[in-house]
Image (cartoon, rainbow, N blue to C red):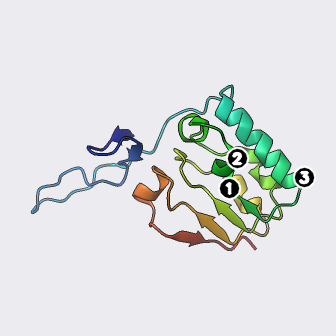
Amino acid sequence: MTKVNSGMNSPHCDCLDQQDQRRDRRQWSEMQFHAEEQDTESDGWKRLVDLVETAAANAREEFAPARDMIGDVWEEDVVTLPPTIAKLKSVRRFVLGRSSVVRIPPEIGEMENLERFDTYTSQRMSDGWPRRRLCVKTR
């Protein structure tokens, strides 16, 4: 579920917000995750898939798609990552900044050298996730 926060123009995630905000009755409702479907025909998606292929072919150690995406296509067109991220065997640091990504595919576990997964400036991931770099061990 996504809403635009007052004072913020970008969408953010409210999945982990408590439903009943009264001080004496903080209760959690059943959690529902994002149901947005990825438009695989969008310019942003196609560009991301191309960037994954290029990074894999060049054995890059850092993957930061926002740096190579023109305009708002990264922020507006992409809600998940392609399963082809499994090809990023050399990537040690994955920077997910300035995105609207809400789902990470299980193929991230196939990124053999991934050490840092940075969501700090990712509007929708950092709302419900710790505002820090996530360190992962895939082996």
4 sits to left or right of 39 = left
Lateral position of residue 39 relative to residue 98, left or right: right
Q: Which residue is mark 1?
A: 64
Residue drawn at point x = 35 percent, y = 54 percent: 16
Q: Amino acid at mark 3?
A: Ala
Q: For mark 2, does the 10 Å Cα neighbourhood hold few (<14), some (14 to 19), or many (20 or more) residues? A: few
Are the residues flagged by discs 1 and 3 in contact, CB closer than 8 Å?
Answer: no
Q: Which residue is mark 2?
A: 68
| Residue at 65 percent of width and 70 percent of height | 116
> In this image, 43 relative to 20: left or right?
right
* Residue mark closest to the camera, 1 vs 2: 2
Q: Quadrant of the N terminus?
A: top left
Q: Earlier in the sequence, mark 1 or mark 3?
A: 3
Residue that appears at 77% across and 45% down: 51
Q: Quadrant of residue 41?
A: top right
Q: Secondary structure at mark 3?
A: helix
In the rendered image, the vertical position of residue 90 relative to residue 57, given as above or below: below
Q: Nearer the viewer, residue 7 or 131?
A: 7
Disc 1, disc 2: CB below 8 Å? yes
Q: Which residue is mark 3?
A: 57
Distance from disc 1 to disc 2, alpha carbons, whole Å, reads 8 Å
Work out whether 8 lies above or below 89: above
Mark 1, Cα crowd under 10 Å, few <14 / some 14-19 / many 20+, is some
Residue at mark 1 to residue at mark 3: CA–CA distance: 15 Å
